[in-house]
Image: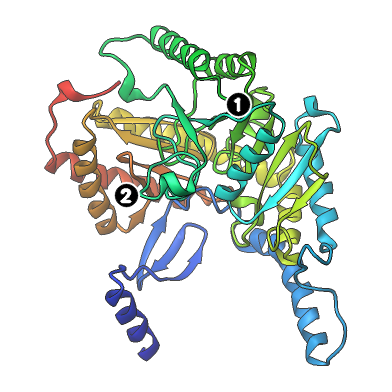
Amino acid sequence: MKCAMISSNLLARAGIPNRVVDAKLGVRAVVAGDETLVLGGACAEIATGPRLAALVRPGHEKEALALARLEKDEPTAPLSVHTSIGHPGAVVDVLRAIEPHVPASWTDDWRLSLQLDGASAVRAACDLLLRQCDRFAPVAVGMESYHGPPSSSVGGVGVLDRALKPPQLSYPIPSPFRRRAGEADGDFNARVFDEFRQFCKASSPQVVVFEPQWGSSLAAMPWPVELLRACVAEARESGAKVLCDEVMCGMARHGLGRLFLSDAWRLDPDAISLGKALGAGVNPIAGVLVRHSDAPPLEIHTYAGASERALMAAAATLDALGDDAPLAAAARRAGDWLAAAMEELQAASRGRLLCHGLGLMRGAIFAHRDAAQRARFGDVFRANCERRAVLPYHVPVGGFMITPPYDVDLGTLEEGLRRIGQALDDTYATVRWDDAGLAT
């Protein structure tokens, strides 16, 4: 109790809410002493219980063996290796495990750069692609998108942008808040494509970053696939390299049968970033695959990709997500159920909620065009979720995401969606909107 009190006091003095997670199994968690259903998690977790244990056990067992030998003052396999010395043996396992997931069109001409987190993976991908260009130009990112901490990552806004960010441009995206009243899907997509084509002609970007399925910036909304294919082709026609950022939407979470969504949709990019779940949601490791690179076959930076335990977890995770693997199949089944449940939430909202997503990465945006109204609605909804003991992934755009582990118990997931529905009903009852301001 004394330690808990000290911890709480330190958090309070720092102005940080006490949200210490005391225990967790699947989507059931004890947060700051209270039980809650955690349906978010930002796509980091792919497995729970014994399945998660199987992914991380080999690395922990090797670490335990190393500790036992160290205590006897005996030589042992290193737990981490600085790049000035060499690399851990598990690097070979990661290369073997990721090879079946590399897009077939890349043949054998690809490189893997290991990083610590998704943001550094995206930035490394941009750098590796710019090395292939004959001139330097700003990186192009989608309007309102961000790819990591806003102060230093590609996309986003922050007070240190000019000092820390690479030069960047913003291209038009098919956000529902850019759709004109009464504009049909085909007309809207055609207008966005024309705007993107004009952007490429005017700006001549050297690297264009696409999120096949947006994360926090648009609450799991996927691109219309034919529009995305057209924009990728246009970017390449203009001379740009294409990066697909799949830090959130990759790792087979989309349920379409391949590790990467860009591969399932046959986008054929020049680079793909991956992260979050690569280390089974436990170990800090991320990476970027690059085609036609003059970089070494494997890049490891300082301690990124140097942890034996993280590498072993990554190899086990990649092996567990083969097209026919049980964990990937579980994600597809749960994703089908979640799709139907989200449709029910949208129907019950009477136009106040825009639901979308793929597989086990689903989301909803409050449909008002006014960002301040969406934020107000989101604040009330967040409080109602806390009262109902359910925690989706609340996102800044004004909405939420549902991103459970792949082996989530469907009965528990159903209970969580029921609580979210109740929190939404509570919010609809207290926050009034002018229906004329709703996006479609």
Three-letter amino acid code at disc 1? Gln
Indicate the secondary structure of the residue bearing disc 1.
Answer: loop
Q: Residues within 10 Å of mark 1 (few under 14, many from 20)?
A: many
Q: Which residue is mark 2?
A: 419
Report whether 336 appears left or right of 439. Answer: right
Residue 79 percent coordinates (x, y): 76, 72
Residue 355 percent coordinates (x, y): 37, 31
Residue 217, by quadrant, is top left
x 25%, y 13%: residue: 181
- Which residue occupies the foreground of this view, 366 or 337? 366
Residue lying at the far front in this picture: please name it. Answer: 135
Q: Which mark is residue 12?
A: none
**Quadrant the N terminus occupies:** bottom left
x 69%, y 34%: residue: 258
Q: Is residue 55 visible?
A: yes
Q: Residues within 10 Å of mark 2 (few under 14, many from 20)?
A: many
Q: Which residue is mark 1?
A: 206
- Which residue occupies the foreground of this view, 390 or 131? 131
Three-letter amino acid code at disc 2? Arg
Q: Are marks 1 and 2 in contact (CB under 8 Å)?
A: no
- Which residue occupies the foreground of this view, 394 or 208? 208
Marked residue nearer the N-terminal end (1 or 2): 1
Residue 249 percent coordinates (x, y): 56, 38
